[in-house]
Image (cartoon, helix red, strand yellow):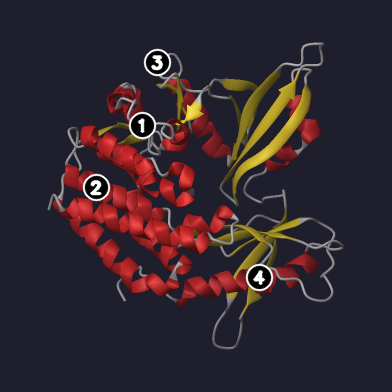
């Protein structure tokens, strides 16, 4: 088994999460449910960070004393967090699992503010009624995104929507800096709203529909891929002064572990794919460092009247490589059909965009890095909350194969 390859430790950590729940519940002052309660069936989210650990959220039954429990095998040292060792014995220390009552995430201190309807209305309502507050994404210990909808009190009930990005205070400070750097440049990024909170950044909603929605009617044939390369060209030189973050392709071994945990029956196949991608990466040209978005894909690009109207999610903005931004977009387009029949046009859009992108960067590098991006998305199928998640993961695996074949054509 090659260095960093997935092994039984990943499965052991996943099993340890559910096994630790009864003891964590007792430590947190709750009541362990009587009878049978299938914790695995009531897992509502999972995040695997190879090398760091696995985190998950669980629905708890009535009578426990709280609705949801967070658990992680990551090492956290925040006071007051419950912890227990699973599988501890004379010869091994076991796996330490830490837990918390949602929304008291130990590393996201302001998550409690963002999920509290009264506090959200008081902080960002401007006197309007809060008529909607929904969690859009939540990665335990890392970040969360919530959508808040306000409605005026007057006879004309006008609505406005804002997004609350929750993170560790240092990450939110960096995100605020990034938005400030792009403000006034002509790049359409959402405005930052006050008042400020250390662990929450409030943003106005971007206008338009996502690129994924925009390509459905005509498979993107009426969109100009040059608009997307021009948007990246417009990123200011000051972006190069920000801290650099690795591209998705830089962590292919980590995501190989996560993919193998999701599809253990495909372990050998995944290993061969990763090795093939790595061979293409080492033999192709990445180009020179440039200002980069870092997570340039369909959900982060909004369009209005078929033109780009908003660029979202600036968390990874910084020095990078053009090929990685373009590959991020192609890799996501490649897996879009796995999300349902409505996205079947994404396959044609993939070719439409690629024909232009290949003129800007090394095509072999472009397709290899697109394959790496698609590989990182295999494990994410488990978080879809669907009984067919394994079918989705298999479809994404087939997409990786196709992207590697495209890289092969330029070898």
The image quadrant of residue 240 is top left
In three-dimensional space, the C-alpha distance between marks 2 and 3, rounded to whole angstroms, equals 31 Å
First in sequence: mark 1 vs mark 3: 3
The answer to which of 239 and 35 lies nearer the viewer is 35
The image quadrant of residue 277 is bottom left
Give the residue number, with chain letter if any, for mark 3: 185
Q: Secondary structure at mark 4?
A: helix
| Residues packed near mark 2 inside 10 Å, few (<14), some (14 to 19) or many (20 plus) | many
Q: Residue at x 77, y 19 (%)?
A: 128
Depth check, mark 1 against mark 2: the one in front is: 1
For the N terminus, give its image quadrant: bottom left
Q: Secondary structure at mark 3?
A: loop
In three-dimensional space, the C-alpha distance between marks 1 and 4, rounded to whole angstroms, equals 44 Å
First in sequence: mark 2 vs mark 3: 3
- Image x and y of residue 324, in percent: 29, 41
The answer to which of 5 and 305 lies nearer the viewer is 305
Give the residue number, with chain letter if any, for mark 4: 18
In three-dimensional space, the C-alpha distance between marks 4 and 3, rounded to whole angstroms, equals 49 Å
User: Relative to 190, is 406 above or below?
Assistant: below
User: Which residue extends farthest top?
Assistant: 155
Give the residue number, with chain letter if any, for mark 2: 367
Give the residue number, with chain letter if any, for mark 1: 220
Q: Residue at x 68, y 30 (%)?
A: 148
First in sequence: mark 2 vs mark 4: 4
In three-dimensional space, the C-alpha distance between marks 1 and 3, rounded to whole angstroms, equals 27 Å
């Amino acid at each position: 088994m090659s260095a960093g390859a997935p092994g039984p430790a990943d499965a052991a950590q996943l099993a340890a999460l559910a096994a630790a729940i009864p003891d964590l519940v007792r430590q947190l002052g709750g009541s362990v449910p009587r009878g049978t309660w299938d914790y695995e069936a009531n897992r509502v989210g999972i995040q695997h960070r190879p090398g760091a650990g696995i985190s998950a959220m669980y629905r708890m039954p009535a009578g426990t004393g709280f609705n949801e429990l967070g658990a992680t095998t990551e090492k956290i040292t925040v006071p007051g967090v419950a912890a227990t060792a699973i599988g501890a014995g004379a010869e091994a220390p076991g796996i330490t699992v830490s837990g918390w009552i949602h929304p008291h995430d130990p590393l996201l201190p302001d998550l409690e503010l963002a999920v509290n309807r009264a506090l959200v209305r008081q902080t960002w309502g401007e006197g309007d009624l809060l008529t909607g507050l929904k969690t859009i994404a939540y990665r335990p210990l890392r970040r969360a995104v919530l959508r808040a909808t306000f409605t005026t009190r007057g006879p004309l009930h006008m609505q406005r929507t804002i997004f609350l990005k929750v993170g560790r205070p240092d990450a939110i400070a960096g995100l605020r800096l990034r938005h400030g750097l792009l403000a006034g440049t002509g790049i359409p990024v959402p405005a930052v709203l006050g008042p400020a909170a250390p662990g929450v950044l409030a943003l106005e909603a971007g206008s338009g529909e996502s690129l994924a929605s925009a390509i459905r009617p005509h498979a993107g044939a009426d969109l100009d891929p040059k608009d997307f390369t021009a948007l990246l060209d417009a990123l200011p030189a000051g972006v190069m002064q920000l801290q650099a973050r690795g591209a998705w392709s830089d962590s292919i071994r980590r995501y190989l572990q996560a993919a193998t945990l999701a599809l253990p029956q495909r372990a050998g196949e995944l290993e061969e794919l990763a090795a093939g991608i790595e061979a293409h990466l080492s033999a192709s040209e990445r180009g020179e460092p440039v200002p980069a978005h870092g997570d340039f894909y369909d959900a982060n690009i909004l369009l209005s009247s078929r033109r780009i109207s908003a660029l979202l999610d600036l968390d990874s903005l910084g020095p990078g490589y053009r090929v990685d931004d373009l590959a991020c977009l192609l890799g996501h387009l490649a897996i879009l059909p796995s999300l349902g029949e409505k996205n079947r046009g994404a396959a044609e859009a993939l070719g439409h965009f690629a024909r232009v992108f290949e003129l800007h960067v090394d095509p072999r590098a472009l397709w290899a890095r697109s394959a790496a991006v698609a590989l990182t998305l295999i494990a994410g199928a488990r978080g879809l909350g669907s009984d067919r998640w394994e079918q989705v993961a298999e479809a994404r695996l087939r997409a990786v194969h196709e992207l590697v074949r495209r890289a092969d054509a330029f070898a």
